[in-house]
Amino acid sequence: MRLSPFSLGLTNSLETACGAIDRREGFLVAVDPESDGEPVPAPGLGEATPLPGWTESLSACEAALREVGDGNRGKELVTDALDRLDPAETPAARHGLALALADAAARDAGRSLSAHLARAEDLPAPAEAVPVNATIGDGGPEATADAAERAVDSGFDCLKVKVGARDLDADVDRLRAVRRAVGEDVALRADANGAWDRETAREAIERLRPLDLAYLEQPLPADDLDGAAALRERRKGVPIALDESLASRGLDAVLDAGAADAVVLKPMALGGPDLALAAAKRAREARVEPVVTTTIDAAVARAAAVHVAAAIPDVVPCGLATGPLLDADLAPDSCPVADGAVAVPSGPGLAGDAFDDLP
C-alpha cells in the first residue's frame, strides 16, 4: 500500500461544525499488484479526505492508514487489515482503503465499481447515469432566484437552497422567489444545516408548505432527533431529511427515532462505498429515501460516490455536483455534470485507466 498526500484549495471557504476551511487535504491510497508468481490482480486506488466535524483529523487518518499498511502490499492487504479500521473512529481512512480494495477487485473482474458494489448487496444492475441537484447558496431573493433560473437553464430539475443564515422571513421570501422563478415542475429542497430551534422549524414548516418542498434538510441541530421526529409528525406535506445527524448520532439512531423521511449519505463519513451502499439499503428497507453526496472530495472519491448512487435502484437526485467547489483537482473529472445528471464511468473499477497516472 502506498500513500500520496495532496492538498487542494476551495473556490470559496467552506463552513463546517469545526469552523471555516479553505483547503481539502487527504491521501491517495494505492494498492499495487504483486509479482510473486501468482495471478496478478489489478491495481486499486482509493481516496481518504477527512473533513472536520464529519470524520477523524488528517493526522489520525494518516496514522491509521500507516498502521494497517505497514508491511502490507498487494494481496497481503486483505480483509483483516480493513477490519482493523473502525468506521466510527477513522471513517476517512477506512474509505480510502475500502475503495482501493474494491477498485482492485472490480478491475480484476472486469466490472464497474457500481456493478461490483451492487453484486455484493444483491441489488439489480446499476444505472448508467445519476440525477443530481444544483446547490444555491445564500443571497437576497432576487439573487437567489437568478441563480436558480441559471441552474434550471443549464439542465437541473432539482435545486437545493441553503437557508438558516438569515431570519425566517428572509428565507421564506427567498424560497418563494425561487418557486415563482422556476415554476412547479422543478423539485425544490431547502437546507437549514441545523440552524433553527424547534419553534422556528415548526413555523418554517407551516409557512413553506405551499411551496411543495421535496424536503427540508436538517432543520434542527444534529443531536435533536426527538425534535426531528416531532416535526415529521406535524410536517403537513414537508418531508424531513437529515444530514449532520448521521455524523452525530448514526444512521441506526436516526431510523430508530423515526426522525427522517430521507437521509443524506456521505461515503467518506460512513467509512467507504461498501458501507454507504449498505446504509442506503437499510434506509430503503425502513422506507426512508437515501440521497448520496460528498464531503467536497477530490476526483477519485467523487467518482466512487457516483458509483454508490448508481447502485441504488431508482435513486433520487443526489448532491454530487461538487467538483466546481475545488479550484484544482487531482485529475480531470471522470463524472462531469451535464443536463442535471452525471454519467457513471463504464470502465472496470472506478473509471478504467483514467486515474492510472496518479501517484
Image (spheres, helix red, strand yellow):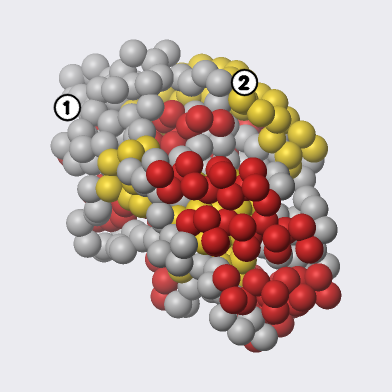
Q: Is residue 164 above or below residue 34?
A: below
Residue depicted at 53% across the width and 34% down the height: 297
| Mark pair 2, 1: CA separation | 40 Å
**Number of numbered discs present?**
2
Image x and y of residue 356, in percent: 31, 18
Amino acid marked by disc 1 = Pro
Q: Residue at x 42, y 71 (%)?
A: 284
**x then y, percent, for residue 150:** 48, 42
Quarter holding the C terminus is top left
Q: Which residue is the site of mark 1?
A: 39
Identity of the residue drawn at 78% across and 63% down: 169
Q: Is residue 294 visible?
A: yes
Residue at left offset 64%, top offset 81%: 235
Looking at numbered disc 2 in the image, what kind of residue is underneath it? Gly
Residue toward you, 274 or 235: 235
Mark 2 or mark 1, which has the lower sequence index? 2
Helix, strand or loop for disc 1: loop
* Position of residue 11 in the picture relative to residue 298 (left or right): right
Q: Quadrant of the N terminus?
A: top left
Q: Quadrant of residue 39?
A: top left
Q: What mark, if any, has residue 2 been given in the picture? A: none
Circle 2 SS class:
strand
Q: Which mark is residue 9?
A: 2
